[in-house]
Amino acid sequence: MEPVLDTGVVVDCVLADGHERTLADDVLDGLTRPLKELPPKHFYDTRGSELFDAICELPEYYPTRTERAILDACAAEIVATTGAGELVELGSGSARKTRVLLTAMADAGTLQRYVPVDVSEAALRESAARLVEEYPGLRVHGLVGDFERHLGLLPEPDASRLMCFLGGTIGNFPPGSRRRFLRGLAKRLGTEGHLLLGVDLVKDPLMIEAAYDDAAGITAEFNRNVLRVLNRELGADFDVDAFEHVAFFDTEREWVEMRLRARSRQTVTVPALALTVEFAPREELRTEISVKFTRSRLEADLAAAGMELAGWFTDEREWFATALARPI
Ligand code: AVJ
């Protein structure tokens, strides 16, 4: 923890070497299962974050630009409904979408504090420094941490809290963990608080599959990059080119899955874990699920987490939704 600086920025860091620890645990768990799996959070090293930024610009990847258009159109109404004075953002990154909400709060005269949560200290500090310059009087209290593990370390609300979790990342959680996670968020809202969730919606499977298997192959590279992370961080010896990108929409579960399929038999060693892993020819490693929601699925999840829908903002074609929720 650091003392308050005259810049208006405070940053708490709870990520020391705990992060690498999670990677090792996740890899040991995931690669020794009968159906091999890795959690998607390990995609986002420097190169992975760059590839994700490139994905957001792809013609096939509609979620980012659709959500942005919804926020542009609805930020003022969201701020009016919530009276928000404090914006908490989970996975703030470079805080690009944040400005729309901060500006709406500034325009409404309610803006007091921004609380970004991100695993990247550099990105968080950079955006905090820029935002206090752009929004005179804004205080920033950042938390460098993992939103799945460190929400207990968030500061108490000091004004009506709006907590946002945008981009559709809630879709990365399988149903049970998703409800548990949402329950955890509900506890951190305070009595006046609201949650703003970006959710991708169920639509034509071909359109979803194109968004996760673009013609330029950027998503394939993003997917394979997780193997490079394992090679670098754990000394693994994955032959990255021996794995092909697979993306398909599971119509029953209503989620898209990304997998890496071994082109031929592979033997991989992970010295840091004293682990040897065999892949049969065409064996698949699941690297991500991304749930596509309906309004009623989200309402059921919110109810299970002690919340209710307070607003539902979508684009004309109903590709994506920004949902406002509050504790019951
Ligand atoms: C950042 C989790 C919302 O699921 O669409 C993009 C990640 N994966 N292309 C998503 C992703 C493949 C993205 N989220």
Image (cartoon, grey):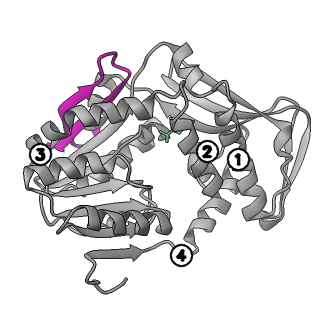
Give the mark nearer the N terminus: 3 vs 1.
3
Q: Quadrant of residue 315?
A: top left
- Residue designated by label 4: 16
Q: Nearer the viewer, mark 3 or mark 2?
A: 2
| Labelled pair 2, 4 in contact (Cβ < 8 Å) | no
Closest to the observer, 93 or 172:
93
Where does the image place residue 211, in percent across and percent down from the top left? 55, 25
- Residue designated by label 2: 51
| Quadrant of the frame with the C terminus | top left
- Residue designated by label 1: 225
In the figure, 288 relative to 270: above or below? above
Where does the image place residue 275, in percent across and percent down from the top left? 82, 58
Separation of residues labelled 1 and 2 (CA atoms):
9 Å
Give the mark nearer the N terminus: 2 vs 4.
4
Image side of residue 278 versus residue 234, left or right: right
Closest to the observer, 3 or 263:
3
Give the mark nearer the N terminus: 3 vs 4.
4
Q: Is residue 311 visible?
A: yes
| Labelled pair 1, 2 in contact (Cβ < 8 Å) | yes
Where does the image place residue 122, in percent across and percent down from the top left? 49, 68
Q: Amino acid at mark 4?
A: Ala
- Residue designated by label 3: 82
Residue bounds of the magenta highlight: 304-328
Separation of residues labelled 4 and 1 (CA atoms):
23 Å
- Predominant secondary structure, magenta span: strand
Q: Nearer the viewer, mark 1 or mark 2?
A: 2
Separation of residues labelled 3 and 2 (CA atoms):
34 Å
